[in-house]
């Protein structure tokens, strides 16, 4: 039976569902849930700092992808459910505790604590979906979607747990396979034999709320980078390190400015008014592109830590990749974000990425100080900000001025 032929059924627990009254505010319960991810991003940054090689970068990316899927699917759930109702609030607190355990397991996730990380990941993904099926009972379009995602989450959870048991290269392969399957499943609508697939245009997502949730995570990541550099500063508080800290701080402010000063508010409006395109746009913009920007912030934070520890040292390949590659990754993600939402060519961001990548070998070959590399990265990012000021007038008008995510009181 198709959705159009289905009989009208009232939700069994309507009080657990969000009312659709336009832009749904981010609640204090959701913001409280997000707090644990400050610790998570810190753990990921430290893991990259302690493993500054290509295998370490790959493992960091894999851990970020798994952590992101736990967070973003929870954000989707609270897009449909009322976070301030007791059962949903209890779920979020349980997910928060599980996320804390996952984060604690990150440093040894590819060693002794891998099984713990895997079991908690599987429990969170499965538990949240089963709760959702209970909470949305009688709401046909939501029930249909969660019924189709459940078998996929069962499959990926089994792979993740098997990887936690196996260890070594097998663990990495199975975890990477689980992420690839989840990406493919989401892209094609989690098809299930006999049930069909979940079409993005039927998700009835409140896109403005999801946009604000992801903006909050970007703030978390930027805030963590500042905390990391501040912590390093307290260990080496002198004139040179203080100057390096100011440079790192300027870089964080520049990344914040690129994301929030113009396009964040406009992105919220575009997503909220996309109609049947909202589900598909949200899938690409939030599930796929935002973790790229978060990864850029994490890599930049690793570069800032190295900047504060050895600002005058010659730039090695690793230092240049951290210092210049982090902003390049962030700007590449933001360029794709703009291209998807507004169907424009983000020329300034593309040009900035090209310049930053070109500077990578130049900084290493010329043996420039790490501080000089960081200054160049900040100058390129500032150039993007200046280019935005002279952008097309129509773009400036619809971009407006963002204040970041709304508080529950606004």
Image (cartoon, rainbow, N blue to C red):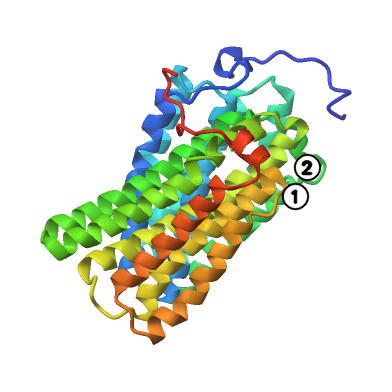
Residue 366 vertical placement versus 168 (above, below): below
The x, y position of residue 398, in whole percent, is 63, 34
* Residue farthest bottom in this picture: 365
Residue lying at 43% horizontally and 31% vertically, measured from the top left: 92
Circle nearer the viewer, 1 or 2: 1
Q: Where does the image place residue 175, in percent across and percent down from the top left?
A: 52, 62
Q: Is residue 231 left or right of residue 116?
A: left
Q: Is residue 313 left or right of residue 221?
A: left
Question: Toward the viewer: 370 or 17?
Answer: 370
Q: Is residue 99 visible?
A: no
Q: Nearer the viewer, residue 49 or 196?
A: 49
Q: Which residue is mark 1?
A: 188
Q: Quadrant of the N terminus?
A: top right
Q: Residue 78 location, x and y as percent?
A: 53, 29
Q: How many marks?
A: 2
In the foreground, 24 or 162: 24
Q: Secondary structure at mark 2?
A: loop
Determine the residue positioned at 27% across, 63% down. Answer: 305
Give the residue drawn at x 44%, y 37%: 216
Q: CA distance from mark 1 to mark 2?
A: 7 Å
Quadrant position of the C terminus in the picture: top left
Give the mark nearest the N terminus, 1 or 2: 1
Tell me, for residue 174, which label it has, or none: none
Residue 197: which numbered mark, if any? 2
Mark 1 element type? helix
Dot 1 and dot 2 residues touching (CB under 8 Å): yes
């Amino acid at each position: 039976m198709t959705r159009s032929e289905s009989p009208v059924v009232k939700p069994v627990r309507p009080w657990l569902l969000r009312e659709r009254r336009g832009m749904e505010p981010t609640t204090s319960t959701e913001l409280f849930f997000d707090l644990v991810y400050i610790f998570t991003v810190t753990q990921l940054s430290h893991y990259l700092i302690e493993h500054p090689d290509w295998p370490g970068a790959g493992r960091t990316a894999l851990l970020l992808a798994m952590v992101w899927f736990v967070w973003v699917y929870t954000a989707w759930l609270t897009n449909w459910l009322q976070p301030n109702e007791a059962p949903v609030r209890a779920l979020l607190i349980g997910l928060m505790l599980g996320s804390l355990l996952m984060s604690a397991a990150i440093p040894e996730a590819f060693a002794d604590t891998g099984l713990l990380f895997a079991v908690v990941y599987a429990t969170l993904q499965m538990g949240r979906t089963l709760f959702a099926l209970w909470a949305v009972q009688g709401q046909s379009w939501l029930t249909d979607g969660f019924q189709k995602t459940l078998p996929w989450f069962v499959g990926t959870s089994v792979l993740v747990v098997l990887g936690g048991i196996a260890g070594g290269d097998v663990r990495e392969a199975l975890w990477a396979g689980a992420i690839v399957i989840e990406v493919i499943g989401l892209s094609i609508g989690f098809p299930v034999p006999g049930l069909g697939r979940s079409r993005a245009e039927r998700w009835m997502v409140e896109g403005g709320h999801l946009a604000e949730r992801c903006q909050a995570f970007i703030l978390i990541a930027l805030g963590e980078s500042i905390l990391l550099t501040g912590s390093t500063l307290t260990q080496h508080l002198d004139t040179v390190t203080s100057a390096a800290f100011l440079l790192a701080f300027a870089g964080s402010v520049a990344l914040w400015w690129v994301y929030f000063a113009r396009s964040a508010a406009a992105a919220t409006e575009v997503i909220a008014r996309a109609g049947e395109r909202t589900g598909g746009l949200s899938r690409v913009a939030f599930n796929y592109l935002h973790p790229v920007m978060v990864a850029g912030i994490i890599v930049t934070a690793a570069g800032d830590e190295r900047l504060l520890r050895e600002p005058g040292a010659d730039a090695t390949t690793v230092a240049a990749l951290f210092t210049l590659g982090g902003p390049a990754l962030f700007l590449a993600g933001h360029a794709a974000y703009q291209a998807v939402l507004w169907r424009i060519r983000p020329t300034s961001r593309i040009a900035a990425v090209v310049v930053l990548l070109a500077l990578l070998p130049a900084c290493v070959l010329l043996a420039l100080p790490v501080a000089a590399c960081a200054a160049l990265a900040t100058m390129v990012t500032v150039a993007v900000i200046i280019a935005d000021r002279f952008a097309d007038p129509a773009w400036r008008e619809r971009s407006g001025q963002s204040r970041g995510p709304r508080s529950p009181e606004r």
